[in-house]
Each structure stands twice: as structure tokens, then as C-alpha cells.
Image (cartoon, rainbow, N blue to C red):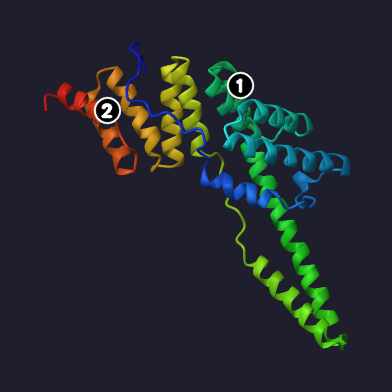
Amino acid sequence: MAANKKPTGCKKMSRSAIPLLLLVFFLFIGIEYAFCQEAFKMDENTFQKFKLAKRMFEKGQDLFLKEKYDKAEEALLECLESFPNYSQTDYFLSQIYYQKGDFEKALNHINKAKANYKFMADLLVASQQKYLDELRIEKQNLQNALPTITNKEQIEKTKTKIEIINSRMTEPLPLVSEMSADYCYFNGNIFMKLKKFNEAHANYIEALKLNPLHGNASNNLASLYFMIKKYQKALDYLTQAEANGVKINPEFKKAILKALGN
């Protein structure tokens, strides 16, 4: 797809935008258990590095949300030193460098984030499964001990612990995706800044394949098609973006309709 005009109507990604999937990821990844699946077995030294990296990631994430980008960058880079495959760390670093206008660095980190995404998603499932296995063992031990307890207060405490475990065991395993649509969308935004419009187009299309309701990807595709004077395609994508909740630029819509003779 060729283009030689400056894109118009592109919706910039919110500084604090975090995919819902990642929020779920962060919740579950906090469970500090060894990994049960064969592909994720780690020696104790590696596992300790992971736990340290997780703490630094959480610190960097918190600073990022407060828009303290320099301090967030420092914490996130320290995270990667301990655990280079931590894809969410690269994702946030990519956003930081995007905000700073260093688009080459942003591109480097989003590429690493995408390359390691499935590894971290699989790791998440393995760690959560191990957590559930540990809960089952703890529950069985409590149930076995219950008939031997004579103190009423201790009996109630034990029953309460079992109820808590039952509640935790009903939590669903996290869904594993080959890739987050937001990673591809943000990758497209970086290519737009670098004026690599073919690559931007490919990433927005990929984002829509992963999530057909990704309105921001549709909005930016509308801009790309407007640039090369494919006005009907531009209108189709803009309509799709609007249907999926994006607050579109009314002047941009007017420009498309005018180009179509409406």
C-alpha cells in the first residue's frame, strides 16, 4: 500500500491505556509459584530472578500510570535485566519512548514485546495451574485434619480456610492469546510516526483480525485509505470505528464525504 501524504484523523493511543487482558495478566502473574509445565521448569536461581523482575515491573507500571516516565523507564529497564523475556515490560517501555518521540526505540521494544508475548502468556497459565494444584493439596490436608480437631474455635477457623480455598479455586484460568490486538495497534502507531505506512497498515489489519471490534485500528485505517484517495474504504473503516465506540473527528468525516461527493 503506497502513500505519500501526511496521515490525517489518526487517533493517538491514550498514555494510560492498558488492555483489559493485561490487567488480568498482572493479577494472576503475582502468584509466586514454580512453573509446572515442562516447557517452563526453572531452576531456583532463575525463578528468584523472575520474582525480582516482577516487583520491578509492578513498580514501573505504577510510575507509568502516574506519567512519571523517566522513573518508570528506570524501573522497567531494571526488570528486563533480571528477566529479558518479560514482554509486558517491553510493551510499557515502547509506550514511554513513543511519548518521548524516540520512535526507533519504541519500535525495538514493541517488537520484543510481540516476540515474547506467547511465552509469557503460556507461563501465566502454567503458574496459575500450579497455584490451583497447591490449593487442592492444602484443601485436602485441611479436610483430613478436620476430624481430629476438638477445639471448636479451631474447627471454625479450619472450615473458614477451606471456604476461602474453594472460592479461590473457582477463579477461571486466564485466557491465552497468540497476541494482543493492542500490541499490533500500537506497533502500527509507531510505524505511522516513522512514515512507514505499509507496515502501519499491516499491523492495523492484524489488530482487527485479532479483535474485529478494535475501533482505534479501524479509525487509523480510515486515515491511511484517505491518504491514497480510496475514499469509500476510508468511510467504511471510519463507520466501523464509530460503531465500535471511537469518538471520531467530525471534520475528518466531512472531508471523506465531500471527497465522495456527498
Is residue 245 shown above or below 183? below
Q: Nearer the viewer, residue 83 or 57?
A: 57
Residue, disc 1: 108
The answer to whether one can see residue 176 in this image is no
Q: Residue at x 20, y 23 (%)?
A: 255
Query: Which amino acid, by three-letter code, is at mark 1?
Result: Asn
In x, y percent, where is residue 6?
35, 14
Query: Left of 87 or right of it: where is 177?
Result: left
In x, y percent, where is residue 109?
62, 25
Is residue 180 shown above or below 132? above
Q: Nearer the viewer, residue 26 or 46?
A: 26
Q: Residue at x 37, y 18 (%)?
A: 1
The quarter in which the C terminus is drawn is: top left
Is residue 178 shown above or below 189? below
Dot placed on the residue nearer the N-terminal end, 1 or 2: 1
Query: Which amino acid, by three-letter code, is at mark 2?
Result: Ala
Marks 1 and 2, how far apart at CA: 29 Å
In x, y percent, where is residue 70?
64, 25
Q: Residue at x 26, y 34 (%)?
A: 236
Dot 1 lies on which element? helix
The answer to whether one can see residue 255 in this image is yes
Q: Nearer the viewer, residue 105 or 200?
A: 105
Dot 2 lies on which element? helix
Query: Left of 254 or right of it: where is 19?
Result: right
How many C-alpha atoms fall within 10 Å of the one at disc 2: few (<14), some, or many (≥20)?
many
Q: Residue at x 41, y 24 (%)?
A: 201
In x, y percent, where is residue 91?
59, 32
Query: Left of 92 or right of it: where is 226?
Result: left
Query: Left of 30 or right of it: where is 262?
Result: left
The circle on residue 234 is 2
